[in-house]
Amino acid sequence: MSMLSIICVIIITSFMETLSDPSSLKTYRVNKIQSSIELTGLGNDPSWSKAVVLDDFTYPWREEPAPKTEFRALWTETHFYFLYHVADDEIITPRRGLGERDAVDSDRVEIFFKADDQMDPYYALEMDALGRCLDTEGKFYRNIEFDWNWPEGHFVLKASQHPEGYVVEGSITLSSLTSLGLYHDDRILRAGLYRGEYASREIGEIGVKWISWVLPDSEKPDFHIPSSFGILKLED
């Protein structure tokens, strides 16, 4: 092996180790609660006051400031709970009779989960302002099974709209996260937090701007890569 090849291997290995090391990634603290949360789609359960507010969302591929997005999460011994508050003065939710696939062209928030940086597999929840969810299983790179569904009875989603935007909240059982290989009792979830912001253009078309918690290592919009993920750390 040439010296150049050895150097390339060292650089790639170092990069992958950095991605895999939780201490090197953006981290959000998920506080623990003792009782379950009542999911209404309004995000008004008193327990949400115990969650850390995450509003560090930006346009990774645009210079302009992104509209406000807030994320909260809590957990119990059995469930992971999440809540999005989204500021949006034009909520777009087409109804084309495609079922959950209509969420793809809608204003939505997303959570991706991966077990490791191989992303083989990884899972996506794309949740719109009507409470529709496109849940998929993928394998790197972008080999996506659109007909896959989260284990039945282990995922609950509620949503609501208001004049300033919309709210999405839900719960996921820790047992389903474990069965999918995403949680190993280490209190770490490797997750990406995203938003698709849709808006009408003057020519009558609909355009989308992508919003993310983590700045992905990509020159063009792409969340289906290891560097778009951060760490959700479950704390006592």
Image (cartoon, rainbow, N blue to C red):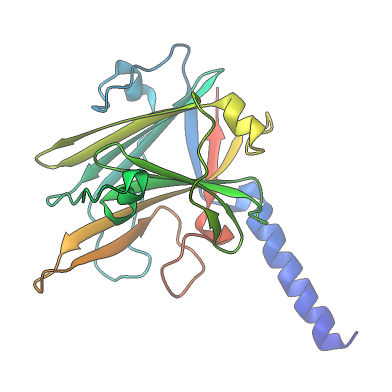
| Image point (24%, 43%), residue name | 86
Which one is in front, 126 or 8? 126
Which one is in front, 104 or 17? 104
Q: Residue furthest top?
A: 35
Q: Residue furthest front?
A: 97
How far across and down, in percent of the image, does residue 63 sit? 28, 71
Can residue 187 be seen from the camera position used here?
no
Quarter the N terminus occupies? bottom right
Total marks shown come to 0
Q: Residue furthest right?
A: 1
Residue 130 is left or right of residue 80, and the answer is left
Quarter the C terminus occupies? top right
| Image point (23%, 58%), residue name | 198
**In the picture shown, does residue 183 fall above or below 222?**
above
Residue 85, quarter of the rendered image: top left
How far across and down, in percent of the image, does residue 89 sit? 12, 50
Which one is in front, 177 or 22? 177
**In the picture shown, does residue 220 fall above or below 232?**
below
Residue 30 is left or right of residue 65, and the answer is right
Can residue 231 be seen from the camera position used here?
yes
Residue 184 is left or right of residue 194, and the answer is right
Residue 7, quarter of the rendered image: bottom right
**In the picture shown, does residue 163 fall above or below 47?**
below
**In the picture shown, does residue 153 fall above or below 165?**
above
How far across and down, in percent of the image, does residue 107 sit? 25, 51
How far across and down, in percent of the image, does residue 68 sit? 24, 49
| Image point (39%, 28%), residue name | 51
| Image point (61%, 53%), residue name | 24
Residue 2 is left or right of residue 163, and the answer is right
